[in-house]
Amino acid sequence: DGGITQSPKYLFRKEGQNVTLSCEQNLNHDAMYWYRQDPGQGLRLIYYSQIVNDFQKGDIAEGYSVSREKKESFPLTVTSAQKNPTAFYLCASSTQGAWTEAFFGQGTRLTVV
Amino acid sequence: AQSVTQLDSHVSVSEGTPVLLRCNYSSSYSPSLFWYVQHPNKGLQLLLKYTSAATLVKGINGFEAEFKKSETSFHLTKPSAHMSDAAEYFCVTSSSNTGKLIFGQGTTLQVKP
């Protein structure tokens, strides 16, 4: 089945550690996105990529990094510089253009312990 | 700049009664508009999308939305609420330049037995 897969579903991080969230899609989409969701808030864009080997910062990129070496994959690293990383992280993908909907993964819940 | 505003942060209805979730948009041209639903700890699922082909858009699970240019609105409706409709709903538009999604703040729908 075509879709977008995030792993792991739950992730625990110690203070000062970097962690990487995985996002893979087999929809042949060019664009991929990472969002952060906090309780009672909407989705905030962290990074997005419209093509392989290229990505742009979103609204809250500080403390995060990404790579886009393959079309199918867009991993997100939460670095120790992110002071409040506990949140629900959502990855999405879409074809190019303003009229196309995005498809979302099931999310990763990251908790700092 | 494009934006969407969801007019209610929380809506409560009784099972079997109509649902109305309100969304206004701001755009200097004909926008693309979407409604997504998110159940707890899940990713977002597309309910329906407006692509200028028809002003009344039918989606999944009995939902529909009407695009009203004169009112700059794209309200989501359903004739009869089910308990399974309880979730978070997002009105979304898309940037004409980049295709990035622009989210409203979300509306929590509560369905009472």
Image: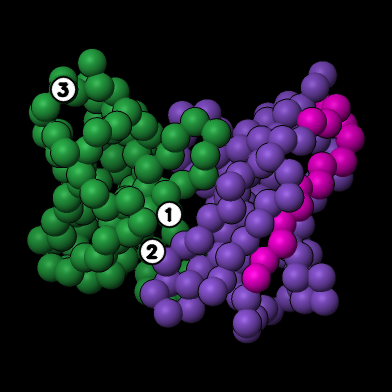
Is residue B20 a member of the stretch shown in magenta?
Answer: yes
Q: Earlier in the sequence, mark 1 or mark 3?
A: 3
Instruction: Give the total number of marks visible in the rendering.
Output: 3
Earlier in the chain: of badge 1 and badge 2, it is 2
Crowd band around label 2 with a 10 angstrom C-alpha radius: few (<14), some (14–19), many (20+): many
Q: Between marks 1 and 3, how big is the CA–CA gap? A: 32 Å
Q: Residue tagged by mark 2?
A: A94
Looking at the rendering, in which quadrant would you find the C terminus of chain B?
top right
User: Where is residue A80 drawn, in percent x and y?
Assistant: 14, 34
Tell me: B107 left or right of A61.
right
Identify the amino acid type marked 3.
Answer: Glu
Chain coloured green: A
Query: The residue tagged with tag 2: helix, strand or loop?
Result: strand
Using the image as rendered, state which of residue A26 and residue A48 is in the foreground: A48
Dominant SS of magenta comes to strand
Q: How would you rate the neighbour count of disc 3 (Cα within 10 Å): few for under 14, some for 14-19, many for 20 or more?
A: few
Looking at the rendered structure, which numbered label has been put on residue A103?
1
Give the amino acid type for the residue marked by disc 1 in the picture. Answer: Phe
Q: According to the image, label 3 marks what residue?
A: A15
The first of marks 3 and 2 along the sequence is: 3
Name the amino acid, label 2: Ser
Q: In the image, which residues are magenta?
A: B12-26
Q: Is residue A100 left or right of residue A82?
A: right
Q: Which chain is purple?
A: B
Does B27 sit above or below residue A105? below
Q: Secondary structure at mark 3?
A: loop
- The part of the image, by quadrant, that contains residue B56 is bottom right
Query: Residue A23's x, y, as percent?
Result: 25, 46
> What's the CA distance linking mark 1 and mark 2?
6 Å
